[in-house]
Amino acid sequence: MASVIAHSLLPEVQQFLESGVKKGFVGGKEVEASNSETFFTKDPGSGATLAEVVALQANDVDLAIDAANLAFKKQAWARLAPNDRSAMLHRLADGIEKHKAIIGQIEALDAGKLEAHAQGDVQNCADTLRYFADLYQHARMRTTLAVKGHDAWTSRQPWGACGFIFPWNFPFLLIGWGIAPALAAGNTVVIKPAEDTPLSTIYLAHLAQEVGIPDGVINVVPGYGTVAGAALAASGKIKRMSFTGSPEVGRLVGEACGRNLVPVKLELGGKGAAVVFDDVDIEQTAQKLVGAITFHTGQVCCDATRWFVHKKIYDRFVGECVDRLKAVQIGYQMDSNTQMGPVVSAKQRQRVLNYLTKGKAEGAECILEGGIAEVEGFEGHYVKPALLAGSIDNVAAREEIFGPVAFLSPFDSEEQAVEMVNHTDYGLANSVWTSDLNRAARIAEGMCAGNSWINAHNVFPHGVPYAGINKSGMGGGVNSIETLFDYLRSISVVRPL
Ligand code: NAD
């Protein structure tokens, strides 16, 4: 199948793609669907079929949850001495780094990512594993309580089998953000990758076994969201659930978990804003926001998709952005000259085009038209970047598009800017751009979302909590000590003296 891809691949990648149907991974063994159903995953940049993948059914997912519970009960993982478990996670990180070029290429092909970006995601996954492996060893697991007449303490314990459902935009990076804290804390996991991008997750399961992670600790259940994903979310045998994806599906997952009283974390969409004051370096700021909206072709939940620009610099700023966006090199993701690759699927491209049409129909000014982009020799899902402007009530300013489209509006006071930012149902991440750091801090705290950035957008150092509020999520976040504690339940122990 891989022979149809018009690009030279690493021999290991070629071999992986040509090694037959990609199976699920349960209890350390490859598994097929009980009804033999499969689906095909494609290269978004060329349309070529990459691999045939098993579509696991509800009963197959149930077996995977049993395998995760059994591995937890056997205590081969949870009862490892913390430094031994940490050493194993470092070994997994070593394995990921050793195979970075291979995983990066698989990810780039499957998700339509630029190869360098995909490799960055792979490195990030390894870094996240190391961060939580080390953090666990230093976090306080037992706290003595000063209570009159009693010997008392609290202690943190892993939950057991944890479920994870992931989207297609950052498959490998998000796996790290998701499962690293759970594994470091001693839990076992069942992972449902997105049907558009299952390959790097399947590769990881094999790698984990190779480096010695015990069987059943990491289980992978590829399949359709409405079947495999829904079965995972509806299982009362999962002790903790994590979903990353759209608010629409997030609600379904939240409802299903609620019925079983399973704690759930939802990390959902966004409609982030960037507030640009008149004291910025206009060229530099334009460059950074153009970089943010074209990064992974705008398929980034925390992107700045609403740009509020001080009216004194609005026209100049818009001009700088238009020039830069017109110059963005659109092309096949594996071509080293490409600056912006395809979107993930025909469905996603149609979604972007529909929002451009609906936005204009509702009266948005079209500063840069966008639309379908042709890339010679490739039948992929390419779009051009677009800029719209106008009322913040426009559909393109309100709803998540998930493509390289920004919506601009001018403002003339600090208060007005904050009001415009907060005019949304979402609450994921926003940024403020100014050389006045006092003003930056005021605005950063006034913007109603889980995360605010100053003079930058998309900043994720390990150790800084990242989570959404409102329609962007609930129930916890990623990448901090709070995330580790989410994967440990706290119990109290007391003895009257
Ligand atoms: P999606 O909600 O369509 O799918 C996400 C996952 O849910 C997939 O694995 C899918 O198979 C599964 N799924 C679909 N229907 C299901 C059901 N009924 N029950 C259980 N699982 C089901 O989202 P997507 O299109 O893959 O991803 C894009 C969305 O993800 C955007 O809204 C984006 O903002 C969001 N996202 C959020 C974050 C964050 O950190 N907050 C990160 C990345 C992506």
Image (tube, rainbow, N blue to C red):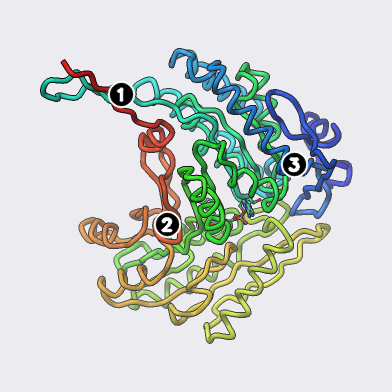
Q: Mark 1 sits on what residue?
A: 140
Q: Which residue lies at the image location 46% right of the left edge and 46% below the top edge?
A: 265
Q: Nearer the viewer, mark 1 or mark 2?
A: 1
| Badge number at residue 81 | none
Question: For the residue marked with disc 3, what is the amino acid?
Answer: Leu
Q: Which residue is mark 2?
A: 428
| Crowd tier of the residue under label 2, counting other residues whose Cα lies within 10 Å: few below 14, some 14–19, many 20 or above | many
Q: CA distance from mark 3 to mark 1?
A: 39 Å
Amino acid at pointer 1: Arg
Q: Residue at x 51, y 58 (%)?
A: 269
Q: Earlier in the sequence, mark 3 or mark 2?
A: 3
Hey, which residue is sitting farthest front in the picture? 496
**What residue is shown with label 3?**
56
Where is the C terminus found, in terms of image quarters? top left
Residue 120 visible in rendering: no
Using the image as rendered, state which of residue 210 and residue 297 is in the foreground: 210
Q: Is mark 2 within 8 Å of ligand 1?
A: yes
Position of 343 relative to 482 (above/below): below
Tell me how far mark 3 sits from mark 2, CA to CA: 32 Å
Q: Is label 3 in contact with label 2 (beta carbons under 8 Å)? A: no
